[in-house]
Image: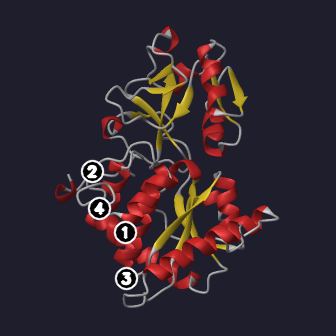
Amino acid sequence: MWCWRRLNCDFAKILAVLLTVMVGSLPRVAQADPPLVMPIRSVDLAGVQECYNDPHPGGFCDQCKSPNTGNYSLTNYVLLREALKAGGMDVKLVGIGSPNSARSRMMVETGMATIKADWDFNMDQNEHVLKSDAFIRSGEFFKGIYGLPENPLLKNIHDIRDLRPLIAATNLHWRLDWQVLQNMRLASLFPASTMSQMYNLIGQGRADFTLLEFSARPDMVRELNGLKLAPVADVKVALPGSQHFMVSRGDMRAERIIAVLNRGLKTLRENGLLSQCLHQGGVINAKAADWKVLNAGEPGISEHHTFDLLENHR
C-alpha cells in the first residue's frame, strides 16, 4: 500500500496489525472484544511484541515475576494488561510503534490508537480522552540527583539548601523536572533539548547535576556515550504529578474500559501486584526506598505514598 501521508501510514500499520491478530484467531472462539491498540516507543516495540507473542513463564511478562530493565514501555504494557485482566475484560492488547510520546498522545486523541499511559496534566483539559484512576499517585515517582561521581560539590547534600549554590540542567519539555528544579531556587538552570546535551553540560563542568530515574545497575550509575553519572546517596526528589491511562473517546468502549481499569488497578494495588510491576519494571528502585525526599514539604508531595512489596510478591 502506498502511503501519501504520515497519517495514512499509521492507519495502514494499525490495520495490518489488527488483521494479523484477527486472522490468527480465526480457528479459535471469537474474542469478546476487538483488540485494544497501544502506541509504543519504536525503540521499545520489539520487547513488547515479544511479550505479546510469548508470555515467557516466570519472566517479566508473566505478572512481573522477574526484572525488566530499560524498557519502560514494556512495564506500562504489562501493567495495563494485568489491570484489564483483573478488572474483568478479556481483550488482546496490541502494541504499535510511535516515535515519541507526543505522537503517541495524538494517536490516542484521534482514535488511531486506544490507550496509553501518561501524566495527569496531559489529560485533565483534553476533551478527546478519558482518564483512569492513577497507577502512580502524585509524589510516588522519584528521581535521583545525578552528577559526576568526582564532583566535590555533590559530596555533602542533605537538604535543598545544599543544592541552591549549584547549577542544574534538564530538558525544558520535561515539565515536572523543570518545575521541581525551579522550586529549588538554584544558582542557575540550563535548558537542554536532548539527553546527550544534558550529559555534555555536566561532563563539561557547565552544570553540576540533573534529575534522572534511578538506574537498575548495582551501582545505580547511568551512562551515555561513555559518560557516567552517579546519584547523590541518601537523597531523592518526588515529582508532583500522577500517572494514569488515557483512553480515546473515539472508541465506543471508552467508558467501559475506564470502569474496568479502575476496578483492576484497585485490585492490583490491594494485592501487591502493582507494586511488584513498578519495582520489577525499574520505575521504583528499592535501594532508594528509604532515602530522604528533599521536596517532601511541597504541594502534591507526600512521604506516605510508598509502594511496599507485599510478602506474597517479594
Judged left or right of residue 303, residue 248 is: right
Disc 3 to disc 2: CB gap under 8 Å = no
Which structural element holds mark 1? helix
Query: Which residue occupies 31% across, 35% down?
Result: 287
Q: Is residue 207 above or below residue 98?
A: above
Which structural element holds mark 2? loop
Q: Is residue 37 above or below residue 79?
A: below
The amino acid pointed to by label 3 is: Gly
The residue lying toward the viewer, choosing from 76 and 152, is 76
Residue 301: % across, % down:
50, 47
- Give the residue at the far front of this rendering: 1
Query: Which residue occupies 67% across, 80% down?
Result: 250
The residue lying toward the viewer, choosing from 67 and 300, is 67
Residue 121: % across, % down:
65, 58
Point out which mark residue 66 bears: 2
Query: Which residue occupies 58% across, 18% down?
Result: 208
